[in-house]
Amino acid sequence: MRIVAGTLRGRTIDGPKWDGLRPTSDSLRETLFNVLGPSIAGARVLDAFAGTGAVGIEAVSRGAAHATFVERDPRAITLIEHNITKLGVKNACAIIRGDFMRAPASLAGALAKAERFDLAFLDPPYELPDLDDAIRRAGALLAPGGRVVAEHSRRREPAPRIDGLSKYRTLTAGDSALSFYTAVEGA
């Protein structure tokens, strides 16, 4: 895997050496950041279900002020730590060990310290029972004007409206899709 653009363009990210982790592909990350465009500059980014940390690291490379990674697998946490250290972006990153879906109280406290997020990116397992709930949880952590982007199977579309969030775009690539949400005014 490689960083697609920004100050780290062309640098590589180490991937998992075990089965069961599906990193966001280089081409899907490129599509994601092409849609987000210059809004990523100065942003505070949440990379939930972070895996390798590729999305958060790509955001930092493209000018995000900070990336917070949430991951429960100790192997993935070690991998994220390795990748951010290797690329020299550790000072712009924080890692929270925990299950984004199971420990909302403890995560909310840790995430509150990171302030609100301008972008929350979710890449849960495609078989996650309640993708809408993950999107709802991420939406509660947004700064005004923030957005949630969820990666999911194209065969499993999340709801168009979720607790004050409205889906404004869906992009598909192979079996994967990205659904983009923004806060609804007055909701």
Image (cartoon, helix red, strand yellow):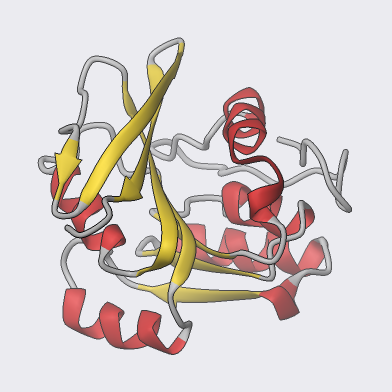
Image position, residue 71 (x, y; %): 40, 63
Viewer-nearest residue: 82 or 6: 6
40 above or below 157? below
Q: If the image is split into quadrants, where does the N terminus sit?
A: top right
Viewer-nearest residue: 128 or 146: 146
Q: If the image is split into quadrants, where does the C terminus sit?
A: bottom left
Q: Residue at x 15, y 33 (%)?
A: 159
Q: Residue at x 39, y 27 (%)?
A: 169
Viewer-nearest residue: 141 or 94: 141
Image position, residue 126 (x, y; %): 27, 32
60 above or below 55? below
Compared across the picture, whether 147 is left or right of 5 comes to left
Compared across the picture, whether 179 is left or right of 55 comes to left
Q: Residue at x 43, y 40 (%)?
A: 21
Image position, residue 87 (x, y; %): 82, 61
Compared across the picture, whether 30 is left or right of 86 comes to left
Q: Residue at x 81, y 40 (%)?
A: 5
Image position, residue 111 (x, y; %): 38, 79
